[in-house]
Image (cartoon, grey):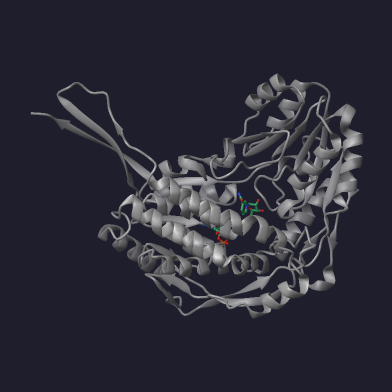
Amino acid sequence: MKLEYSDVKKTAAKLKFRTKAFIHGKFVNAASGKTYVSLNPATGQPIAEIASCDGADVDLAVKAARHSFEQGVWSKRSPAERKHVLLKLADLLEKNLAEIALLDCLDAGKPITDCVTIDAPDTVHCFRWHAEAIDKEYEKVAPTSPGNVAMIVREPLGVIGAILPWNFPIQMGAWKLGPILATGNSVVVKPARQTSLSALRLAELAAEAGIPEGVLNVIPGNGSVIGAALCKHLDVDAAAFTGSTEVGRQLLHYSAESNLKRIVLELGGKNPQLVLEDAGDLDYIARQAVNCVFWNMGENCSSGSRLIVHRKLKDKLLARMLEVAKEWIVGDPLDPATKVGPMIEESHMNTVLGYIESGKSEGAKLVLGGGRTLKKTGGFFVEPTIFDEVKPSMRIAREEIFGPVLSVLTFDKEEEGIALANDTTYGLTASVYTQDLSRAHRVARALRAGTVSVNCFSEGDATTPFGGFKQSGFFGRDKSIFAHYQYTELKTVWMQLA
Ligand code: NDP
C-alpha cells in the first residue's frame, strides 16, 4: 500500500483520542479529576488532555485486576478460550492498523512509514504468536519412583504491573501484554506519559475482543507517582519494565521495600557494531550500519551507537555510510518520505544535543550533522550525526545517548575489537560482520550481549527472546516462549499413591 502525505494528514486530523484511564472495563476520569497535556513532538503543539492518575487510581486499578484474577474470569479460562480471545484482539488491531500506527506517529514522532510497516504489524503478529503458543505448551511429570506421581506445573503469577516506554509504545505494549495475558494474569499498564494514546485504544479493543472487565487496566500519568505506587503496591505480584537503567534500579528498591515482587527489566544499551577485517560487501554493511543507528531516531535500546571497525576498512566504510545517510530524510513524521522524526520531547532533544557538544569538546571529529534542525516547525529535531576518531573514554562512546548519534572507533586485532565491543556496562545487542563462518561463531560467543546478529542488524523475531546482559536487563526476556515462563510460578504437586 502506497501512503500519500495528504491522505495521512487528513486521516490524522480526524482521529478521535481515548484520554481517560481504563479501569474495570470502563473509561474513567482520574480520581482527582486532574489531566495533563500530551504534546506532538513534531510541532510542540498539544494533541490531547489525558487523565493524570495518582495513587488512588493505582489502588482502584489493582483492586479491579486482583478481583478479576481471584474470580478466575481469565486466569481459569481454558487455554483454548484465552487463545481465541487474544487472536480476536490481534484481528481487531489489524483491522484498526492505520489508526494504531497514526496514534504512535503523532504521540511519539515516529515516522508513519515505520509505524505502518513495522510497529503496528509487529504488534498484531506478537499477539498472534503468544495466543497461538497458549495451547501448544505441555507441562511435566517428574521421573519419580512408582509410588509417587509428581507434576510440575506453571500457574499465572497474579496481578502484574507493566510499565512501558515511549519509543515503541504499542509494540512494547504487545511485548509485555502478549505473554502476560497468554499465561492468565491480570494486568495494570502504565504507559509512558508522552505516549498513552495507543495503549488506551488497545484497552478498548481488548474489551471488544472479550478480555473480561478488570483483567486489563490502563492508567496514564506520571511515572514517579503511579509507576512507583504500582511497583510498591503490596497486591501486585510482579512488575515488567522497559526504560532507563536508572529507573530499573529504582524498581528493585521498590520491590525490596514492599513485597519482594518479581521485577523484569529491559533497560538501555550502548551496542557495538563490530566490523572485522574480512567483512563482506561494504555497501551492504553501510546500509545495515546506518539503519542500526538512525532507525527510530536512535531512540532505541538496541541502537548500534558504536561502530567498531577494523582500521583498514574504516575510511571506505565511513565514506559509503555518509552517502547512505543522505537518504535519511529528517521531517514531518506524517510524511511517508520521512525517515527521521523528532526527539520525544524538548528536554530529551537538549540531552542529545548536550552529548553532541561533549563529543566536539572531547576532541572527536564531527563528520555528519551535529545540531538541531527544522526549528521553525516547533518540533524537536536533531540531525543524524556521526563522529569519527572517537576514543573509548569519551562520553559519546560510553553513555547511552538515545538519539541519532554514531561514534566510530577503530581497532587492529580481533581481540582488541572484541574487547572494545565488550567495554561497556551494557549488554543488550551487538552486530558482527565477517565472511568467515568459524570466526562468526567464535566472536558471537565472545560478545557479551543478549542478542548478537551476524552480518546484519536484527532484534530477532517473535520466536526469539530479547533482553540484556549486565546492566541492560534483569531476570527476564521479552518475546518467545521464554517470556511466558517469567510471568508464571512453578508448582510441584507431589502425590503418594496408595
Ligand atoms: P524512564 O525510564 O524514566 O521511563 C520509562 C517508563 O518508566 C515510563 O513509563 C516512565 O513514566 C516510567 N517511570 C519513570 N519514573 C518511574 C519511577 N520512579 N517508578 C516507576 N516508573 C517510572 O525513561 P525516560 O523516558 O526518562 O528516558 C530517559 C532515558 O531512558 C532515555 O534517554 C533512554 O536512555 C532510556 N530509555 C530506554 C528505553 C529502552 O527501550 N530501554 C526506553 C525509554 C527510555 P513517565 O513517562 O511518566 O516518566
Q: Nearer the viewer, residue 418 or 210?
A: 210
Residue at 88%, 53% (x, y): give it. Answer: 326
Residue 168 appears in view:
no
Q: The C terminus appears in which quarter of the rendering?
A: top left
User: Which quadrant would residue 418 be assigned to in this image?
Assistant: top right
Residue 430 placement, left or right of 161: right
Could you tell me residue 415's position as x and y percent?
Answer: 74, 21
Residue 57 placement, left or right of 349: left
Residue 429 appears in view:
yes
Residue at 80%, 42% (x, y): give it. Answer: 407
Q: Nearer the viewer, residue 438 or 273?
A: 438
Task: Tell me: residue 486, above or below residue 417.
Answer: below
Could you tell me residue 173's position as x and y percent?
Answer: 53, 57
Could you tell me residue 497's position as x and y percent?
Answer: 11, 29
Q: Nearer the viewer, residue 256 or 493?
A: 493
Tell how many labels: 0
Residue at 34%, 56% (x, y): give it. Answer: 81
User: Which quadrant would residue 30 be assigned to in this image?
Assistant: bottom left
Query: Regarding ligand 1, which quadrant of the image does it lie in?
Result: bottom right
